[in-house]
Amino acid sequence: MKAAVLYEVDTPLKVEDVDLDSPKSGEVRVRIVANGVCHSDYSIIHGVLRSPLPMVPGHEGAGIVEEVGPNVSLVKPGDHVVLSLAPYCGHCYYCAIGKQNLCVNMFQTMVKAAMIDGTCRLKKNGKDIHHMAGISSFAEQAVVAEQACIKVPDEVPLDVVCLIGCGVMTGVGAAMNTAQVEPGSSAVVIGCGGVGLNVIQGCVLAGASTIIGVDLLDNKLDYALQFGATHTINPSRDELVRSVRKLTGGRGADYAFEVIGLSRTVEQAYACTRQAGTTIVVGAGSRRDTVSIPMGTFLTEKIIKGSGYGSARPHLDMPRLVEHYRNGRLKLDEMITRTYALEEVNEAMTALEKGEVARSVVVM
Ligand SMILES: NC(=O)c1ccc[n+]([C@@H]2O[C@H](COP(=O)([O-])OP(=O)(O)OC[C@H]3O[C@@H](n4cnc5c(N)ncnc54)[C@H](O)[C@@H]3O)[C@@H](O)[C@H]2O)c1
Ligand SMILES: [Zn+2]
Ligand SMILES: [Zn+2]
């Protein structure tokens, strides 16, 4: 089968034939139908997020189950699924406290870039190729843990709901689960890319009344308004903190989301947060980058929170997101600016880098 392989940081993905082992116990083989392009793929390719290589990126996929390994009970061949990047175990400490997105047994899939048992199913000439988030969906097929498969009704378009696999779950979840945005509140969202636009949609679903989209690119600010922002700010023209205060009764926002992955913009988000308000960091930055917060500001009781995968409880939240899409409360079709073939995956990365798209999707 064909897959897009990253051999070295800062080099293009190579679309070539690779081998895929059969699913082992608790695993499933999925024919990938479509896969959204996320900034985290870009960050892996450019070494901002570190990973063992070679690797097949892609972690925002949807497809159809083709084969199940032994001891699989959650899905069967023919099921349509969105892939969750949190294949949680269900019995560790974090799963027990309802933080499946922090499951300790998922560690292998994230840090070692392998399946939950620490081995790889992807191979080339007998050598291992690593997996991204236990998924690796820039490929015609993928072997994934059965817990990564979230069943969706046959009639929903997989080339649209694939976005729920990362960007939508991460963005809407950051607003609804991590921040628990209150109706009537104010929010500022710094970075209006594929994930940030979904933070905006999450704030709308939660009933926020003032939603301020912030981006350096005016086309992204147009998208922000389309997805529910009430105001926009381009910090290259207007001073950010002052502009946010002006729109929030002079106090600053109840919630400030950073959705880029840079220390500078985390510091800006914190500065835009009102006293006792909450800063939520969604952006995934480099381990070498550190955030600096003035000591004096702790007296203002601001809260700063990270958000991993929108604090997802995948089997609860992802079907709900599909329902929000089906009843028109979540805009997904509008999110897809362009589609690409797998052979064009590097062009999709360039479009993301240049900020040309809200989201693009690679359709197999
Ligand atoms: N926390 C998680 O679990 C999780 C999951 C998915 C993605 N992410 C991360 O979220 C971030 C956003 O991902 P995305 O796919 O939306 O990326 P994207 O490239 O689509 O969007 C980023 C946006 O930030 C804007 N931007 C860049 N620098 C800026 C600045 N200084 N001020 C204002 N705007 C600026 C860009 O113009 C762009 O619109 C990335 O860091 C990604 O790795 C985190
Ligand atoms: Zn992602
Ligand atoms: Zn667990």
Image (tube, helix red, strand yellow):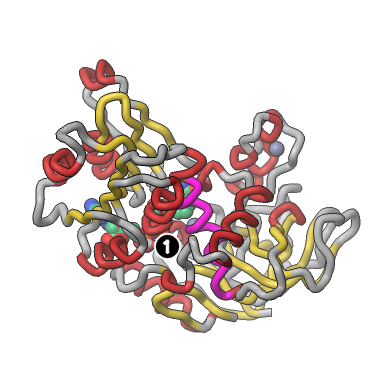
Asked if the residue at label 1 sits under 8 Å from ligand 1, the reply is yes
Ligand 1 shows up in the quarter that is: bottom left
Answer yes or no: is residue 1 visible. yes
Q: Amino acid at mark 1?
A: Tyr
Q: Residue at x 45, y 57 (%)?
A: 40
Q: Residue at x 53, y 47 (%)?
A: 309
Q: Residue at x 26, y 44 (%)?
A: 265
Near mark 1 (Cα within 10 A), the count class, few <14, some 14-19 or many ≥20, is: many
Q: Is residue 219 left or right of residue 308?
A: left
Counting from the top left corner in percent of width and height, residue 141 is at 69, 73
The span shown in magenta is 159-173
Q: Is residue 121 left or right of residue 235?
A: right
Q: Residue at x 44, y 46 (%)?
A: 206
Could you say whether the residue bearing mark 1 is in a helix, strand or loop? helix
Q: Which residue is nearer to you in this view: 271 or 48?
A: 271
Counting from the top left corner in percent of width and height, residue 242 is at 12, 40
Is the stretch drawn in magenta largely helix, strand or loop? helix
Counting from the top left corner in percent of width and height, residue 288 is at 36, 41
Question: Does residue 161 show up magenta in the picture?
Answer: yes
Q: Which residue is nearer to you in this view: 272 or 19?
A: 272
Res. 157 image quadrant: bottom right
Counting from the top left corner in percent of width and height, residue 191 is at 30, 54
Q: Is residue 53 above or below residue 162?
A: above
Res. 126 image quadrant: bottom right
Q: Is residue 318 above or below residue 153?
A: above
Q: In which quadrant will I find the C terminus?
A: bottom right
Q: Which residue is mark 1?
A: 42
Most distant residue in the top direction: 299
Answer yes or no: is residue 57 visible. no
